[in-house]
Image (tube, helix red, strand yellow):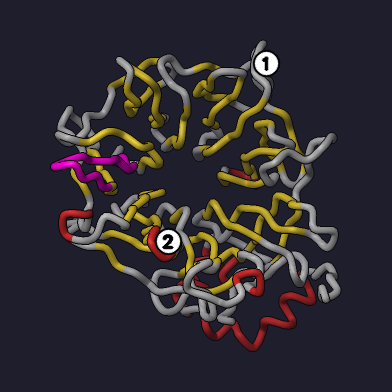
Amino acid sequence: MRRPVRAWGAAAVTALLAPLLTAVPAQARETERAAGTCRPAIQVLGTLPGTASSEADRVKGLGPGGTAVGTSRGLPVYWTGTRVHRVPLPAGYTGGEVEAVNSGGLMVGSLRKPGGSAAFSYRAGARSVALLPGGSRAADVNDRGLIVGEGPKGGALTGVVWTGTRVLRRPALPAGYRLIEVTGINEAGRIVGSGEAFANDESWTAGLLWPARGNAPAVPLKPYWPAGVPYDFWSPEDIDDSGRIVGTHDYSRLDIQSPVHWLPPYESETRPGLLAGRTSGTFEAVSPTTNVSVGTAQDSSFDGPFPPESAPPVQAQIWPGSGPLLALPRLARDGASEAYAVSDDGRVGGWAADARGASRPVIWTCALAQAYQP
């Protein structure tokens, strides 16, 4: 029998979790307070009219002055406060997503049309997007205006760095690798992504780190398969201004994902563990300077619980940089949630299911103050 579902107000969430807030390191809470006046809440953002798409309406990036970016009804959008705004689509394009925004309000993402996709940039209020030459997707942008993503060239997928609408360079791959994706760039210009390598009839994946300048190829992040097993897959997702990289390790044989991070000199990964009671999880983003990482807690279909359908819904999670992973409150008691973005001022963006089961784009404000250990 399905348990009843009810909406959780911000006041009720704060009252319920108050005894648990001691789980959050004091230094992390002070960092949040230093960013300005902060009221813990789950801010539900507006959505475009129409039928929901197969993908959840979600926040993918957080910008200045309460700006957020992402997707609604399968279309690229941005929010000012809770108000949703469409990103204009060029003729022939039918959907897309804004993936990131910098402190100057420059947005980047990808657009879809039958038979293909295109990378774009956009500024609020502009009458049209700027299509980025040679790009199928723009993944991230730093405050210097450097945009990173990927696109096809010579029958292969390559990374691309743009400045404005000009291709600045195509980052080189290590010998024997092909590109899977480019995912992030920090203020220094260092770029992360992932690639697949082939040798002696074997293949494996590795995280990749490109230098900020020059044409040197990416360096594979240790570990990778020659030092492990071929069921391991590493996916770096983001890099902060100090060079800390966060992402996910996928042990495909048991359907187990683990949040991981790499620190210079990148000789090995570190695993902060899993959210209490869960058997799998991810990291999707790290704040630029405050060492806060976010992602999603979930469960393995092979490693429990059993039967698999007894597992609770996925849940947004946050890590202050030390101690255990913490859960972010759900919008509804049995509602799923995921986190994709985190900012230095304590906001976390993603989506959460409401009491009717509909996915809603949300921002957890003063997120660490509402985080708790299950």
Q: What element carries label 1?
A: loop
Query: Who's the residue at 59% across and 73% down the image?
Result: 371
Query: Who's the residue at 42% across and 52% down the image?
Result: 288
x and y, in percent, of residue 358 in the image: 79, 53
Name the residue beneath numbered marker 2. 290
Callout 2 environment at 10 Å: few (<14), some (14 to 19), or many (20+)?
A: many
The amino acid type of the residue labelled 1 equals: Arg
The amino acid type of the residue labelled 2 equals: Thr
Residue 104 relative to residue 265: left or right:
right
Q: In the rendered structure, does residue 349 fall within the stretch colored magenta?
A: no
Q: What element carries label 2?
A: loop
Residue 152 relative to residue 32: left or right:
left
- Main SS, magenta region, reads strand
Query: Who's the residue at 57% across and 46% down the image?
Result: 62
**In the rendered view, would you say 332 is above or below 75?**
below
Name the residue beneath numbered marker 1. 127
Query: Can residue 369 be seen at all in this image of the molecule?
Result: no
Q: Give the range drawn in magenta.
A: 191-204
Name the quadrant containing residue 274. Answer: bottom left
Callout 1 environment at 10 Å: few (<14), some (14 to 19), or many (20+)?
A: few
